[in-house]
Amino acid sequence: MPDCLSTPSRRLIPQHHISRGRIMDASSTSLLSSKRRELLALDTQKKSLESEAEAIVAELTAELPDGGPPIGISTPLVDDEGFPRADIDIYRARTLRKRFKEIQNDHKDLLRRIDRGLVEVAALMKSNNDEADSATNDEQQLRSAPKPAPKFDPVTGKWVVKSWDGAVAGVQDGERRRFDDLMGTNDASDYVTGTATGGGINAASDAVTSSPAATTPSNATTESFMRQQQPTEPVVAHLEPFAIIDQVFSNSPASSAGIQEGDVLLQFGPIHSNNHENFSAIAKLVPQIAGDKKNVPIKVRRKREMELGEISDVIDLELWPRVWEGRGLLGCHISKYVDNGRGS
């Protein structure tokens, strides 16, 4: 990965930092992470185009098997008499040259997008660093500010002091409570006799009963509780075919994954028949996965011949999109699936 896209080391700021009276959220950090992922995906696309361009140039500039002159990148495809050259495949030559021009244009566009992305990342990093420095200065001011007198905590029965961030210091789970919310008395006897506002010991007992800790799930059920709160992906009860693999290139990622020509695509990671958006969702997802150097699970339907006739199997495969010597990051051609009505 290029140095300009690597993650720089930065001073870590605690998540509970308070800056100018408000808790810092993670929105800017999330945006920075998203921009970095976009840059990695663009860089992967750029490398794929460069690899394909190198292969095209190598073929166009190589000597012919019979020792004749190469096809050439821009040389005429006719002989001295104006007739098409008989020693080369004219259609192949024109196809390669056309694709090479497309790659050059796409490469320029990617470079422009990468340049814009780098500027945006630099601006976000500067903003984050400035905000972190501001939070550090604010913390130092709060820590050095005079502290109020200790208060008696009726919940724990202890004297407590105010922490730099306004929480209760000196007791367990005090960081979850605000010192200013404690009743304004400095005499513990008030709570014993019940003269303090709130009803004395009974109020303290009620506070313990109704505290957030009392309603928190036990340790044994916390993990299960958290899982219940997590949003789940919609389940597709029946996967409908939406694409067919009509070409697989040798030594490609698709070939290595075990994909075969004629496989019917049912699912591509989170993408299925209801959300593929005319394959644009796959086009967006593949560079991101390749940039992260991860794999994507796919589900295909494959026909096979049996003695009693033809049957179809549903097969799960793992595809690793990556740069290879051919075109694209997959090494296969996908077309829209059309049901011919004969079943499959």
Image (cartoon, helix red, strand yellow):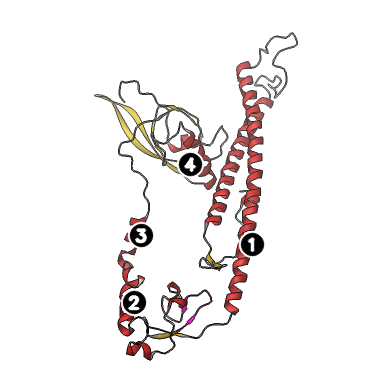
Q: Residue at x 33, y 60 (%)?
A: 225
Give the Cα distance between marks 4 and 1.
39 Å
Name the amino acid, label 1.
Asp
As measured in the structure, the alpha-carbon distance from the residue carrying label 2 to the one carrying label 3 is 26 Å
First in sequence: mark 3 or mark 1? Answer: 1
- Identify the mark nearer the N-term, 4 or 1: 1
Q: Is residue 9 magenta?
A: no
Residue bearing mark 3: 226
- Mark 4 or 3: in front is 3
Residue 320 marker: 4
Asked if labels 1 and 4 touch by Cβ distance under 8 angstroms, the answer is no
SS under mark 3: helix
Tell me if label 4 and label 2 are in contact, CB under 8 Å. Answer: no
The image quarter containing residue 191 is bottom left
Which mark sits nearer the N-terminus, 2 or 1?
A: 1
Q: Callout 2: helix, strand or loop?
A: helix
Expressed as whole percent of the image width and height from the top left, the position of residue 18 reads: 54, 68
Where does the image place residue 342, in percent across and percent down from the top left?
A: 30, 20
Q: Say whether residue 321 is visible.
A: no
Say if mark 3 contacts mark 1, CB within 8 Å: no
Residue named by callout 2: 207
Query: What's the magenta region?
Result: 160-168
For the residue carrying disc 4, how many other residues have a C-alpha within 10 Å: few (<14), some (14-19), or many (20+)? many
Query: Which residue is at 69% across, 16% downward?
Result: 77
Residue at 33% over, 90% down: 193
Task: Measure how far apart labels 4 and 3 are at the Cα level.
Answer: 31 Å
The percent position of residue 90, horizontal first and vertical second, equals 63, 16
Nearer to us of marks 3 and 1 is 1
Is the residue 44 above or below the residue 128 in the image? above
- Residue picked out by circle 1: 130
